[in-house]
Amino acid sequence: MTGQIISALLTVVLGVSGCVAYFWGANRLLDLIFPSHGVQGSAAIDNLRRQGLIRPWLFLGPALIILTIYLVYPVIETARLSFMDRGGQNFVGTANYQWAIGDREFRQAIFNNFLWLAVVPAACTFFGLVIAVLTDRIWWGNIAKMFIFMPLAISFVGASVIWKFIYEYRGVGQTQIGVLNAIVQSFGGDPQVWISIPFWNNFFLMVILIWIQTGFAMVILSAALRGIPDETIEAATIDGANGFQIFWKIMVPQIWGTIAVVWTTITILVLKVFDIVLTMTNGQWNSQVLANLMFDWMFRGGGDFGRGAAIAIVIMLAVIPIMIWNIRNATRETGGH
Amino acid sequence: MAATAGKGFAARWGVHIAVLLIVIVWTIPTLGILVSSLRDRDQIAVSGWWTALTTSAQTGQGRTEGADAQVEQNGRFVIAGNLLEEDDARVIRSFGTRIQNPTEHEAGTAADLGDGVTLQVNEDGSYEQSSPTAFEGNRGQRIFFEAATPPRFTTENYRTVLFSEGIGRSFINSLTVTIPATIIPILIAAFAAYALAWMKFPGRAILIAVVIGLLVVPLQMSLIPLLKLYNGVGTFFGVPAKTYLGIWLAHTGFGLPFAIYLLRSYIAGLPREIMESARIDGASDFEIFVKIVLPLSFPVLASFAIFQFLWVWNDLLVAMVFLGSGSNQLVLTGKLNALLGSRGGDWEILTTSAFITIIVPLIVFFSLQRYFVRGLLAGSVKGG
Amino acid sequence: MADLLLKDVRKAYGNLEILHGINLDIKSGEFIVFVGPSGCGKSTLLRTIAGLEDITDGRLEIAGDLVNDVPPSKRGIAMVFQSYALYPHMTVYDNMAFGMKIAKASKAEIDERVKQAAEILQLTKYLDRLPKALSGGQRQRVAIGRAICRNPKVFLFDEPLSNLDAALRVATRIEIAKLKESMPETTMIYVTHDQVEAMTLADRIVVLKDGYVEQVGSPMELYCHPGNLFVAQFIGSPSMNILPATIERAGSPTAVRLAGGTVAHVPTATPKDAEGSAISFGVRPEDLSIATDADGGVLFEGRIDYLEQLGEVQLLYVDVGRNGEPLVAKLPGSTPIERGSTIRLTADVGNLHIFDGEGRSFARERLATAA
Amino acid sequence: MADLLLKDVRKAYGNLEILHGINLDIKSGEFIVFVGPSGCGKSTLLRTIAGLEDITDGRLEIAGDLVNDVPPSKRGIAMVFQSYALYPHMTVYDNMAFGMKIAKASKAEIDERVKQAAEILQLTKYLDRLPKALSGGQRQRVAIGRAICRNPKVFLFDEPLSNLDAALRVATRIEIAKLKESMPETTMIYVTHDQVEAMTLADRIVVLKDGYVEQVGSPMELYCHPGNLFVAQFIGSPSMNILPATIERAGSPTAVRLAGGTVAHVPTATPKDAEGSAISFGVRPEDLSIATDADGGVLFEGRIDYLEQLGEVQLLYVDVGRNGEPLVAKLPGSTPIERGSTIRLTADVGNLHIFDGEGRSFARERLATAA
Amino acid sequence: QLKFAPGEGDQFTWSDYETLQQTDLSGQTLTVFGPWRGPDEDLVQSILEYFREATGATVNYSSSENYEQQIVIDTQAGSPPNIAILPQPGLIQDLASKGLLTPLGDETEAWVAQNYGAGESWVDLGTYKDENGEDQFFAFPYKADVKSLVWYSPDNFEDAGYEIPETMEELLALQDQIVADGGVPWCIGLGSGGATGWPATDWVEDIMLRIHEPSVYDQWTTNEIPFNDPQVVEALEIFASIATNNDYVDGGAAAVAATDFRDSPKGLFDIPPKCYMHHQASFIPSFFPEGTELGTDADFFYFPPYAEKDLGRPVLGAGTLAMITSDSEASRAFIEFLKMPLTHELWMAQSGFVTPHKGVNPDAYANDELRRQGEILAEATTFRFDGSDLMPGRIGAGSFWTGMVELVGGKPAEQVATEIQQSWDAIK
Ligand SMILES: Nc1ncnc2c1ncn2[C@@H]1O[C@H](COP(=O)(O)OP(=O)(O)OP(=O)(O)O)[C@@H](O)[C@H]1O
Ligand SMILES: Nc1ncnc2c1ncn2[C@@H]1O[C@H](COP(=O)(O)OP(=O)(O)OP(=O)(O)O)[C@@H](O)[C@H]1O
Ligand SMILES: [Mg+2]
Ligand SMILES: [Mg+2]
């Protein structure tokens, strides 16, 4: 055991220090190759200019390499596969895409995904923001935050078990072991099979993701909130603004960039998330979403890589508007720089 | 600002009450997991977890002892015994002999079973069955009863999970995977984010776009091409394909787009004058990054660290694929998962593992919380 | 009605007490100026009055009501922050309009008032800009504009003109004076480092030092009758020359012997027991003049060490043998003087000040009764 | 050696040109002060010199090298930012030591220089504090300290004293002057709004307006011989009184008829063709004095509208019938004057200024040759 | 640590162990990837232990919650285990057609045909088309499950005076009898997270085997007759007539799809009982309440055939199949190991293992229940593998499942079948 701990420690230290060594060393090396200290006049300036050309790439280098290997290459591979047959061996043109357009389930998934996109990012961001703001100024705020954060930390399987027990249905008149039906029944209503009510079941599934992801929004937004200069809030207080007005008119606009980040991230997450649907309904009762459909085609019963890849590409294309919006934001921010 | 003078009653308590309400709503499901993890499987499936907290009426059944336990008393044959175990805390309220009507008779009264046979079951579970004729057969009378069951919890699930073989090793495996897989992407992403936010070079906007685009790449799509690559590299160099380095890089890769995206947006928002001031002080980009940007980015670094840690910690798929699923390489989630039966009905184990895995991320969350400092930039610039 | 009463107001950050029991009684409609060295607690006091900082101890009353626990927004104040505290995401217009929008003023009224304030502050061109695209002075003006757009009972200004150029400064100062005139009921509290601002604007000046009030009084009172050495040196620029001296003969006038041996007859009463004690003798640079032969009382004689030409006036740094610390004299710019030459200076006895061993003015009893 | 040469330097934010071709030749070791109205581009120019802003057009040379593209760190400059730009996460000590640490100075040297700067700036008590626990003036001093701890070829100060009280301001100003004296090779460029600072510190003053250089010259030159109306009014406080007038007789001296009908004989040469043209006539408030009966040339006569007592001096706002715009006069504080009374003012003819229809000084030819 | 010391107990064929010891594999590593986790993993490890002990090979067994996904990834990426053991023929077909499996050879094929009960059906089960479209024997069946079982509580039957039905007619009559007595005959739960619906496929398959010839069943699973063939629709309708009848199922029709298959058998043991019968495979006792004793508290009977149809005693089953995904000496030796009766007996002697291997000693069965299941398997006139597993994954683990959910949700059988057929067409 101790041996293992030591070797683990060693691995950790090696791994991390290797990374640190790269950045430090690469920068050092650059300074050595193109020295700017101790060199006279224009030579130093020339060297500095060279440094300026190279250094961004030193900073970006590892990220770019890793991104290329781990994400860009697979994307290209995916794009390639989306024009191939199920085994990925023969070229089939756009057949996979044509199939997708004609597929009822695919269209269902697109529709549902729109629902998800409309609800989940907004809800998570909103709740996350409200919680971040409220907990920010009370002494037990950190503890409260921990409770909101917990769902995020609970492994997904654990979470799905408990939501099962929330939506669980037992026949009319029986003891309900699902919280929701127990409540409904205690108010004299008839228990429902929540996750099988078409259309509405989407929302019951969304609730789960909202429950989980609000913690995410909360953490990031509370970090951002802490960065708001207090003075502006003080000024607004003096201007007579009440809590709500300060929140909406002073705080929210100032962390708008972060809100956009959170929103974008959750939007993308929604596009990718499939485990909730998979474990709760597996897309039955009209609750299919794209990511689950993709997973289904990729891996179920040996899989059809072509179609899976085609759906994956559709998911990626869906992000383009978000991408454009973000780039706009980014260039606006940096416009002054 | 923390010191702003008084607020009204509503403002003072309203926030507390509102937060409390939200916390309660949010915690109910989590509480459900906690309670479920302390119950045994049968209970989980038959009664709502919230009922576990209170005394509830539950039905049970027992059987009188067989005929050979009978004694003859005053001309009647009597079988006496107890339906409940010695340390059973249940209190019997009513009983019956037909399964369709288990609450026919009140506890403590004698029920007439016909043919002169009577049966009395008392609250403590003791029963006495008497008959004018001798009992036959060695399977006794089935007795159904309804008993008040006090809350019953078991730490058995935790014991099962915590003392399962190899859990310590997988815990260390998990840490070995998680710690570098958290720190490495932070470093790499922070450098990249700084470059994307504050350095001038051609193609910056495009790179930002690409990063956002890569956020959406589904993990599942990358696994096969990557593993192929790993195997290729592995065979080429004659090293095993599944190594810690491999999984760190994999997690780094999957975490990077978000990290860069998040960090860049934060770093770009730092006051420009501070950066300029450092530049004038002669600091190079590297020094500015290390001495100014990193310390000022602690809040966002901490929040990213929390998430990356969490994702890696709770990840199973990537670990299985890139580290392997042998018992030596199993990470904690993998190990806990292996405790579940093949058909996955072990909710008590599931909920228990959920609670065990939650602890480390919570510690991380709490210890990184303090980097969410208020007014980090206060006093640095005037105006704005 | 916006009387302000501070009773033993204390403020501490953690263990560090910044304000040590401030007592002030500000009448409704008064224009009060806080002056004091950097870091003495002026901003802190202002923020305390605004309600942005909790009062650690003491009472703060506005219009007779205890407001220790009243939130800032309910105190009816407007404030200009030393660090501006502009809303970075709002245009200049919106920054100025915010308070009124909150107060649900009509669009037309908001527009009118903002435009008017912008006009006064020469910001009209910049109404659509965000603060980050403004110069330092422009930002400061926006901060002022934000306050004057509103209609509060109390105005708090924290060095509102520090980043403005002289002309604009004068103009804005006059605007503030006018503003005050147009709202006779409104109380204004103003922090400044500028003597001219303090002297011209204030009904009363509060001199602070290290978290204590040193003296409160009208500008002329502080100038002519500083209560102690600190105030004497603080008010007036360049500051009063202070020299060690001894009382040769107490009474009224008091005969004071300077280090150089000269004796001056200061028309201030001193108690008998002070005779022979070491005191400080003060004279303002601008009260010094070149002694003509006709003048009997040459106070100082020395070599001109250094000379600063300021146009209308010139500053003379005269070595009168005080271990290198020069005596400063301010003479009309036209007087022909050469660096290195020797000069003899005198002053009207009415402008001489004497302070006891603890630095308190001997004239303070009179002041105390006058106040 | 740190000559600075700006040749037609232009700077635009997007389409908005802020600096319209600045030409300046700054000698090594000079102390240059930039003055100008708020928003005229002083900070921008300074930031351009520092290399923080790209030059849109033109050439910037330091010590003979074109440095348009040289990064700030290689220009050998230190800068005090108008907005301080302190490192919020570092203590005062570390803020000041940062530049030297980067330059790999020895610990002992850093310590010595920081302590020394802190001493000068009265910051010793606060060395361990973070910027957020400092008052406005203290922050500003840290910013100054940061610059003076380093040993650059060029110092850039952007309104470094605006948040300091008078005494500290004088002290710091003198420290800066001393600093300059101790480094005769170092060039200093200083932005200020304070006339006294500009006058006392500068070797040459650069007056900027709306992104153009209006005049460059030594303090006294600008004071005595302003090149145009703008400079005349900008330098000096309160600013020069400008009145419409016509040239009655050109030549040297020039006879000028004021609106009131008075004729003044100004000893400035005017070209013949200017005769009869409408001009502006200027006289500084401090150059005005009460006309005694003996004086022949009463320039103005009017009612005292308003009176400001500043202690040593008083400001008179005299209604001389200029549509309510008063004439300002600065008289010694001791002169007994009453508001509402009528006063007659005169001035030394040597202190009278005349400007042509476009606002240029008639004396400018002489100035041009003198420069 | 060997569970049963070699040589002890004559129910085991210990001679096999000696044979195994002849093979020396020390220094070699064998990686085995299987579906068993948790308690099942302990069982499989106890078997592997003998292999380790006897041959000296290092055997690494691994499994995963996402094992279907994982095996696809590992084989596709080129780092497969040596041996993969999977329960889904559909998935195996897929791997085979991509050339990721190594044929086991004619000899093994012949061995199965000879030594397994209903040997030809097992050979068929292990035979798949390789990448060239040729049939090869790839998968060695090891460990079977019997699906045609109905579970009940003997006590409750006794108290109510019900008899074990011997024919389908009797079963249907019993069903009505129970309703008449105020009880509920069936507990059916289709819930299974992402796999919701599969228990119903077992019902339908069992019914198929009881109303049609086995050949129809085969045509159905290979789509030689369409899914919406009237013969199939008939089976669906029979199932629907039970599952959508509020009187017949606990909780009413709505509960069927919503109840987890792991929870549903618990209704048998409730007081009063929620239902009297539960159709499920042999693994289900692990989900009975704790302390339930098989044989006394719970028992099973064979899901009977229609007397009038005279189709013999068809048995529906499932099983796991072992394949070589990465060939090596050890892999081959492992397949040989699986052929040994001992390998079967060792697991039989523990729990949850039924085998069609004719050479094993039935005495090795740990209990009567297993033995009786073994007998059902042995007495079967027809044995058919789980049809949904035979169908392509998209159908058998996809539209068939969802279709079943829709069926119990009230959709007409005809329409359900047509939709499933459409999805089948879509992947052709
Ligand atoms: N980022 C920007 N975008 C557009 N205009 C700007 C920007 N920054 C400054 N300006 C404008 O440029 C002009 C000059 O600004 P600068 O800061 O140089 O003024 P300044 O002379 O320093 O004034 P002050 O004395 O008020 O500090 C101002 O009118 C200002 O509004
Ligand atoms: N958050 C804080 N924690 C500790 N000390 C503080 C804090 N804020 C201010 N101080 C100290 O309190 C004292 C008073 O500060 P304040 O801002 O009131 O000064 P000031 O009179 O406004 O000075 P200035 O003219 O320089 O703005 C200063 O010495 C300052 O260092
Ligand atoms: Mg202050
Ligand atoms: Mg400026």
Image: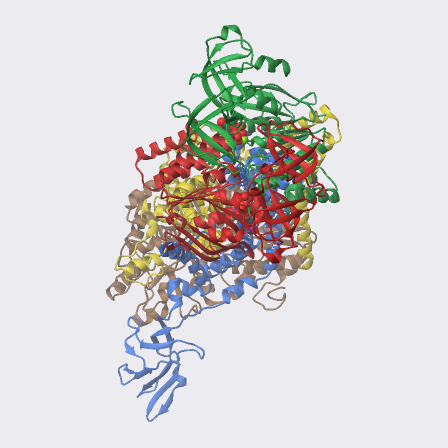
Chain colours: A yellow, B blue, C red, D green, E brown
Tell me where residue C99 appears, x and y as whole percent: 37, 40
Tell me where residue A125 appears, x and y as whole percent: 42, 44
Residue at 73 percent of width and 40 percent of height? D105
Tell me where residue B252 appears, x and y as whole percent: 58, 42
Q: Which of the pair B257/C83 is nearer the observer?
A: C83
Q: Is residue E288 above or below residue B219?
A: below
On the rendered structure, is D6 left or right of B369? Answer: right
- Where residue E425 sits, quadrant-wise, is top left
Residue at 29 percent of width and 46 percent of height? E413
Q: Is residue C108 above or below residue D124?
A: above
Q: Is residue B62 visible?
A: yes
Outermost bottom residue: B74
Outermost left residue: E180
Task: Count all numbered tags in the image, as a single digit.
Answer: 0
Tell me where residue C363 appears, x and y as whole percent: 54, 50
Q: Which of the pair C237/E322 is nearer the observer?
A: C237
Q: Is residue E108 visible?
A: no
Q: Is residue E203 above or below residue B40?
A: above
On the rendered structure, is C64 left or right of D204? Answer: left
Q: Is residue B198 above or below residue C44?
A: above
Q: Please state the quadrant of the image where ligand 4 appears.
A: top right
- Where residue E310 sits, quadrant-wise, is bottom left
On the rendered structure, is B79 left or right of C23? Answer: left
Q: Which of the pair B227/A203 is nearer the observer?
A: A203
- Where residue B134 sits, quadrant-wise, is bottom left
Q: Which of the pair C310/E311 is nearer the observer?
A: C310
